[in-house]
Image (spheres, coloured by chain):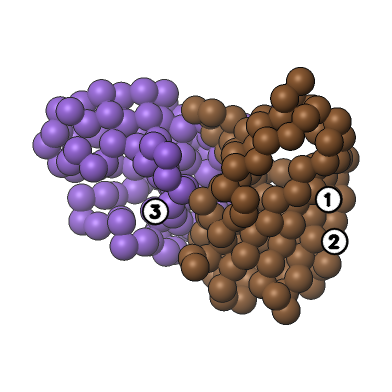
Chain colours: A brown, B purple
């Protein structure tokens, strides 16, 4: 598998439900970031978690990081139709700021 | 809120033509990047730039690509002789630091090579 692989590839839920997306990576990292991309738009940074952190919260978002398993999860609680987008994890393991993106999870939240 | 701006939003060009994509990073940021996303595929790193020189580049960033910071605000990506496979969305990003902070992305420039 490639650095920064998300699963599932696609997720469809009802408004109000929670959405969980997972990301796995292969090499050691400085940090892991989650981004959101609405169709045809740019990438919006959601949350950054450093390699020495295990969990981080931001509003309805909760990110966990397990460096022993080289995996991270993004939980969106109480989802809204406006959360419909693609979500990408990106890992940074260099000092040059090069981030490696995964394939993304396409989330559809039905009203 | 400060943002990264990119122009043009969409450019159509003939194969073999030169293209320059422009970006204005956030003013106090020191690191600048170009990424690209071919339709339906993942976002791919092209190049990072700091202190007026390339910090790192990917295999994609071959001799037909170049970057420049011609003045204190703009950061450009030049594709010398475009190929069909260069058709993609090109994203500029900037960050305060390297390896420690988030990347702020622009909305992208869609390049279509005919």
* N-terminal-most mark, 1 or 2: 2
Instruction: Give the percent coordinates (x, y) of residue A39.
Output: 54, 28
The quadrant of the image that shows the N terminus of chain B is top right
Specify the subunit that label 2 lies on. Answer: A
Q: Are marks 1 and 2 on the same chain?
A: yes
Q: Is residue A17 left or right of residue A87?
A: right
Question: Which circle, 3 or 1, is nearer the viewer?
Answer: 1
Name the residue tied to disc 3.
B46
Report the residue marked by disc 2: A55
As measured in the structure, the alpha-carbon distance from the residue carrying label 3 to the one carrying label 2 is 30 Å
Q: Do the residues indicated by labels 3 and 1 lie within the same chain of the protein?
A: no
Residue depth check, mark 3 versus mark 2: number of the one nearer the observer: 2
Name the secondary structure under disc 2: strand
The answer to which quarter of the image holds residue A82 is: top right
- Secondary structure under tag 3 reads strand
* Element class at badge 1: strand
Front residue of B53/A48: it is A48
- Residue B103 visible in the snapshot: no
User: In the figure, is residue B63 to the left or right of B46?
Assistant: left
Q: Are marks 3 and 2 on the same chain?
A: no
Q: CA distance from mark 1 to mark 2?
A: 7 Å
- Quadrant in the rendering for residue B81: top left
């Amino acid at each position: 598998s490639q650095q920064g692989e998300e699963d599932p590839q696609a997720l469809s839920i009802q408004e109000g439900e929670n959405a969980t997306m997972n990301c796995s990576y292969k090499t050691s990292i400085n940090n892991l970031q989650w981004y959101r991309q609405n169709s045809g738009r740019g990438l919006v940074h959601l949350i950054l978690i450093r390699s020495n952190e295990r969990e981080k919260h931001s509003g309805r978002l909760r990110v966990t990081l397990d460096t022993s398993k080289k995996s991270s999860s993004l939980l969106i609680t109480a989802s809204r139709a406006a959360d419909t987008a693609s979500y990408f994890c990106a890992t940074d393991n260099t000092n040059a700021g090069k981030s490696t993106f995964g394939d993304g999870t396409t989330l559809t939240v039905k009203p | 809120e400060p943002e990264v701006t990119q122009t043009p939003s969409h450019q159509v060009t003939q194969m073999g033509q030169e293209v320059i994509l422009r970006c204005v990073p956030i003013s106090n940021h020191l690191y600048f990047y170009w990424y690209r996303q071919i339709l339906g595929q993942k976002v791919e790193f092209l190049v990072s730039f700091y202190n007026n020189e390339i910090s790192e580049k990917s295999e994609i960033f071959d001799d037909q690509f170049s970057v420049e910071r011609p003045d204190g605000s703009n950061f450009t990506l030049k594709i010398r002789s475009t190929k069909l496979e260069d058709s993609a969305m090109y994203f500029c990003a900037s960050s305060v630091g390297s390896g420690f902070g988030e990347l702020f992305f622009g909305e992208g420039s869609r390049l279509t090579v005919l």
